[in-house]
Every structure is written in structure tokens, then in C-alpha cells.
Amino acid sequence: MLKNKNPLRREQIELLPKVELHVHLDCCLSFGVVSRLKPGITREEYAGDFVGRPKYKDLADFLKIIDHSLELMQTKESLGLVAEDLFQQFKKDNVIYAEIRFAPFLHLRQGLSPSDVVGTVEESVSRCVKETGIEARIILCTLRHYTKEQSMTTVKLAGQFSGTRVAALDLSADEAGFPIDAHIAAFQYARKKGIYCTAHAGEAKGPGSIRETLEYFKPSRIGHGVRCIEDPLLMDELKRKRIHLEVCPSCNVRIGIFNTYADHPIDRLFNSGISLGINTDGRAITDISLTDEYERLQNTFGWGLEHFRTCNQNALQAAFLPGETKAALQEKLC
Ligand SMILES: [Zn+2]
């Protein structure tokens, strides 16, 4: 295996300016914020309910753990605290730009409306951007098992909040368990209204899932997409169409798509010239920071500064941002 002759020290990796496009708000609760929302919780209970196990049977099995976090994210105050907590984690990793995603319908258990949820998170994120200097946008997720109506309401919320930090629509959750049919209309609506799009595909299912996502949703990015490695023609298509892959290596290993980190195709995908970036997916449920993830890439594949720079440049180019904001952030990426 390729080894880097001049490996970066952890402090150097920590200081690298980073872009993270794929991170779920409800998958990142630190012990600190959980202790505030659930006083008295022990480290062991936190590890069991919010961090989870190193390996899961599949994506559907993995998704069950998120309910513990959702239980604590049902009020304006708690949503605000969770957003602040995530920005503190970005700060430690020197993230300069992040896109935070969540599904508004998952936060209605105590009487908030979908619009309350989006408004609250948007306000909190805007406040955190001002306080930390970390630029950010918000992606609203519809979920695979949702109805056409729920998907339409989600995309219309994105439209209603246009001009704020809400920028895009995503399709998330159980890729293998539910088809895309109910969500095609929402993605058509997004395109018509100029709302950016990404969608989870090629994680729990193979190349066929990526192909249908490209055909029916026409997104500029794919969440994961790593199983395109099984289909060289699809890899060519992704390159030709300049589709960016939001890659989350540790999360893929955790849900059993690849047995070990060394089996992950990120290095082969990078070398093929496909545009990709590095993401955590969920910092708590994957038990990883972005710095940890870069360190693993260095230790496993011999990645170094040039790889990290290319990934961050690619991610910034694919960000759901206007050109002038991208240009300003470009100055910060070394
Ligand atoms: Zn995800």
C-alpha cells in the first residue's frame, strides 16, 4: 500500500481549512449537548444511544439509532442548541464552509410546524455563522418512505425560505427499502424553482440506483455514490457530467458496505478523476470528526496535502453557493 513519506501531524490536519457538504444535524449530538438536553445521562448511556456500534447489519438497522437524537430535538430551544453544538465541532476541525441537512418532518412531535422547524434552524445557523465566521447553508431532506405530499411540502418549504441559508433539497433514508417514485415530482419542482438538488444513492444499493437518480432527479451532486465503482461506464458518465460525490468513508464501513476502511473505493474514485469531497455524514453516530477521517485516509491510502486540497476545492466548486461567496471562500482554502 502507498505510504506517504511526509505524513501530516494531527495538529496540521486539524488546521487544514475544510469544506463539509454532507452532515446530518440529527446525527451529530455531542455528549455536551446531550447532557444539557437530558441531564444526568452517563457516558455509557450516551455511547449506547447516540454513538452506536462500530458495525451495523445494513443502512436500515443503522438508521434506528437516530431516534434517540430526534427525541431530544423537538423544541425551538433544543434545535438551537444542537445547531450551536455542531458549529463548535466544525470549529475544532477548522471547517470553513458546511452544508447542514435535516428533515423538517422529524421534529413535529411536540407541536412545532415544519415551517417553525426550518425557521428555527435557519435562525440558529445564521447566528452561528455570524459568531464563528464559518459560512454555511442548509439542505432540507425528504425521506425515502415519505409520501409524494410530504416530499412536495419539503421542497416548497425550501422555496418559501429562498433567499435565506436554506439552499437545497435532498432525498435521504432507506435507499434499499423504498423506490424513488414518490419523490420525482418534488425534484422536478426544485429544478423549476432553481432550488439546488442532491440525493443519497449508490450507498445501500448499487449503480442502478445512481443511474435512476441521475435520470429522474438530475442533481448536481450525489450523497455517497461510491458504488459507481462497480460500473466503469457510470464512472465515465459522472465524470463527463461533473457530478460531485459527497463521500463519507467511515460511515460506509460502519453500515457494512465495505468490510474494512482499506476496502473503501475512495482512493480509486479519486484517481479516476471523479469530483469528490470528504464528509462525516454524522459525527456522533459514526463516532468521527473530519480530522479523524483525514487521518484515516492518510494512514490507509497514503493521502497527503494534495489529496485534501483537491477534495476541498472540488467540494467548494460543488457547493450550493453563489459564485461570489465561493470566490471569497476560495481565498481561505490553502
Ligand atoms: Zn447521509
Image (tube, rainbow, N blue to C red):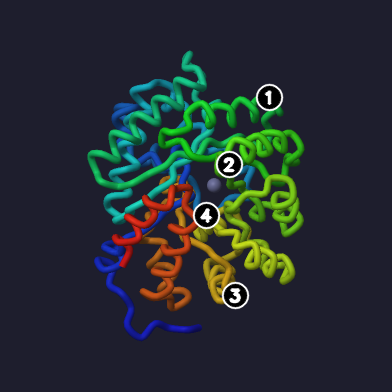
Nearer the camera: disc 2 or disc 4 = 2
For this orientation, the residue located farthest to the top is: 111
Q: Which mark is residue 251?
A: 4
Residue at image coords 33%, 31% = 124
Secondary element under disc 3, as helix, strand or loop, is: helix
Q: CA distance from mark 1 to mark 3?
A: 39 Å
Mark 1 or mark 4: whose residue is earlier in sequence = 1
- The amino acid type, in three-letter code, at marker 3 is Ser
Secondary element under disc 2, as helix, strand or loop, is: strand
Asked whether residue 49 is in view, the answer is no
Nearest to the observer: residue 180 or residue 296: 180
- The amino acid type, in three-letter code, at marker 1 is Glu
Q: Marks 2 and 4: CB-CB under 8 Å?
A: no
Residue at image coords 59%, 31% = 155
Q: Which mark is residue 272?
A: 3
Percent across and percent down for residue 328 are 32, 55
The residue that label 1 is drawn on is 149
The residue that label 2 is drawn on is 170
Residue at image coords 52%, 28% = 104
Q: CA distance from mark 1 to mark 4?
A: 30 Å
